[in-house]
């Protein structure tokens, strides 16, 4: 078959030999991870944050992340960073969104492909530069707190609506309520990640990633309620999850404060 030529009468092989990538500006690409877990007593969502030890945003807390290497995909990079921070493999990891605001990083043009991971048993030990923070997300605010370190970060939220053609979208914008917030645009990653989780939790299996392999129904219901930030009617909830769970035949003491023994369940194998 005769080789096709472009407008300069070059074959693809000739074109690639002459092609100079330096003719075009190339943004750097990172991946950032929203790693979520649950308190041991199911009282709060938790998010893993790291303290930056270099400019920009030195000494500010941020989501774990790093640059994507030339020999790896974004998912490979996210898996590598997740394992280095949690020492876990084969846990839930899903892409949230690609963040591309031109000024999101003061160093240069940096795009971030953000991922969300869900961890059922977070190691709550902390260090000077890495810790789990309680996360509270309502329609009015986002609060991140670590009592041990005496850190409280709060954002107020404004719900905005905008038209794109005939489709109307709703979006949250965050304004820092205190002196110092998360580095870069990481609060936007938190917002988009929680929004996505709320949209998917009713038809996906994400909630099961935040409980132990066996669980009680009160524990599973609390996971849903923490993510949605609203109570659920017990009977409706149990009807909703009934086809996804199976009894083990044993009883288990719930880890919820004041919990008592309840029937033990596990996720039904597909």
Image (cartoon, rainbow, N blue to C red):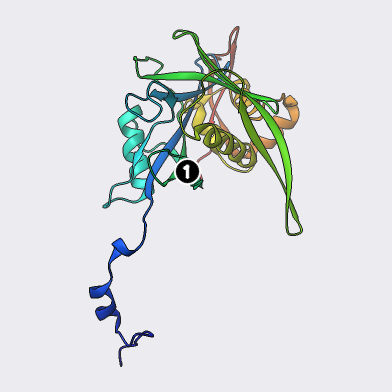
Quarter of the image where one finds residue 149: top left
Compared to residue 165, the image places residue 33 above or below, namely above
Question: What residue is disc 1 on?
Answer: 94
The residue under the point 59% across, 10% down is 260
Residue 161 locus on image (x, y percent): 74, 43
Quadrant of res 177: top right
Q: Residue furthest bottom?
A: 2
Question: Residue, x 50% and y 41% (percent of image)?
Answer: 269
Whether residue 252 appears in this view of the structure is: yes
* Residue 21 image position (x, y, % from top left): 30, 63
Q: In the image, what residue occupies the spot 73% across and 59% down?
A: 165
Residue 267 appears anywhere in the view:
no
Q: Element at badge 1?
A: strand
Observer-nearest residue: 94 or 103? 103
Q: Is residue 125 left or right of residue 205?
A: left
Q: Residue at x 41, y 27 (%)?
A: 57
């Amino acid at each position: 078959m005769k080789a096709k030529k472009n407008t300069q009468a070059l074959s693809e092989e000739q074109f690639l030999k002459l092609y100079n990538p330096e003719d075009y500006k190339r943004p750097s690409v990172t991946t950032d991870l929203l790693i979520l877990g649950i308190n041991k007593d199911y009282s709060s969502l938790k998010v893993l944050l790291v303290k930056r030890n270099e400019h920009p945003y030195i000494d500010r807390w941020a989501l774990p992340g790093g640059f994507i290497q030339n020999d790896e995909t974004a998912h490979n990079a996210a898996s590598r960073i997740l394992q280095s921070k949690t020492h876990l493999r084969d846990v839930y990891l899903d892409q949230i969104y690609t963040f591309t605001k031109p000024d999101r990083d003061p160093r240069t043009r940096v795009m971030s492909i953000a991922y969300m991971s869900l961890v059922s048993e977070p190691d709550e030990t902390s260090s000077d530069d890495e810790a789990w923070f309680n996360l509270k997300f309502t329609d009015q605010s986002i609060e991140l707190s670590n009592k041990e370190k005496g850190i409280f970060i709060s954002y107020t939220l404004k719900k905005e609506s905008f038209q794109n053609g005939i489709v109307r979208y709703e979006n949250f914008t965050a304004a820092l309520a205190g002196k110092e917030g998360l580095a870069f645009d990481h609060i936007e990653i938190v917002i988009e990640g929680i929004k996505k989780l709320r949209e998917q939790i009713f038809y996906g299996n994400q909630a099961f990633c935040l409980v132990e392999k066996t669980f009680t129904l009160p524990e599973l219901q609390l996971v849903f309620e923490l993510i949605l930030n609203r109570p659920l009617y017990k009977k409706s909830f149990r009807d909703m999850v009934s086809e996804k769970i199976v009894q083990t035949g044993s009883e288990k003491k719930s880890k919820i404060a004041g919990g008592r023994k309840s029937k033990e369940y596990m996720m039904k194998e597909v």
